[in-house]
Amino acid sequence: MPASPDIRTAVPGEEEALAATVALAFDEDPVMRFIWPDPAARRENFRAMALPYAGLAVACGTAQVIGDFAAVALWLPPGRDIDGAAATALLQRTLSPALLPAYLAQGARVGALHPAGPHWYLPLIGADPARFGMGFGGALLAHGLAMPDRAGLPVFLESTNPANLGLYRRHGFQLVEEVPGGGGPPKFALLRDVAG
């Protein structure tokens, strides 16, 4: 792998490919495996959940991709987010009724931890599992963090996999709160304060 992989901004028409890469990246994720135990359902449901983020990030010019969709990062600038009602409806259709209340409560708690003022949000970043360990996540983070750094703004993200916390810490993120999963795995709310 090159020391610095080529990173480009995704363009309209690439939303499905972005969402598909993210769904692959999260296939072994602890939270996703818990809420969608069936592998085929997990990939399809997560792809459907990622698609609105991909569409919004592409529209904002803040969806970044490496190579042939080997890895993607979907950044959202201040004040931009997807329709939460549509995401909730997807969860209501696809989650077990026994899991739904706890998962929605966990998501609401994570949402409440976003900074009150203007900030960037990184809802999804991931690599095709065949490309894990090639440094693509770190490259996408370093490249993408230039946007909030230029604006002098913090960045918020949540991680559903504790294995990724070291990567985020190396890029300046600090743990805000470990949010329990109501019988399932926790989510980790992280914040990177203004650089500099």
Image (cartoon, grey):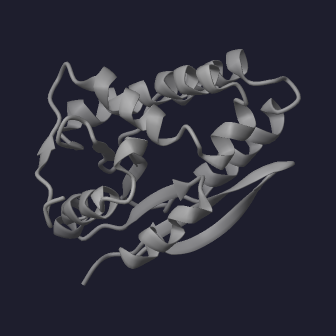
Residue at left 74%, top 24%?
Answer: 95
Considering only vertical position in the picture, is 23 above or below 66?
A: above
The one of 63 and 88 positioned closer to us in this rendering:
63
* Quadrant for the N terminus in the image: bottom left
Considering only vertical position in the picture, is 123 above or below 140?
A: above
The one of 67 and 54 positioned closer to us in this rendering:
67
The one of 154 and 178 positioned closer to us in this rendering:
178
Q: Quadrant of residue 153?
A: bottom left
Residue 188 pos. (x, y %)? 61, 61
Residue at left 49%, top 61%?
Answer: 116
Residue 183 pos. (x, y %)? 87, 48
Considering only vertical position in the picture, is 6 above or below 150?
A: above
* Number of numbered tags placed on the structure image: 0
- Farthest residue, direction bottom: 196
State whether residue 104 appears in this view: no
173 left or right of 44 in image: left
Q: Quadrant of residue 133?
A: bottom left
6 left or right of 25 in image: left
Residue 72 pos. (x, y %)? 30, 43
Q: Quadrant of residue 98?
A: top right
Residue at left 19%, top 19%?
Answer: 13
The one of 87 and 17 positioned closer to us in this rendering:
17
* Quadrant for the C terminus in the image: bottom left
Residue at left 69%, top 65%?
Answer: 178
State whether residue 55 appears in this view: yes
- Farthest residue, direction top: 93
Residue 176 pos. (x, y %)? 59, 71
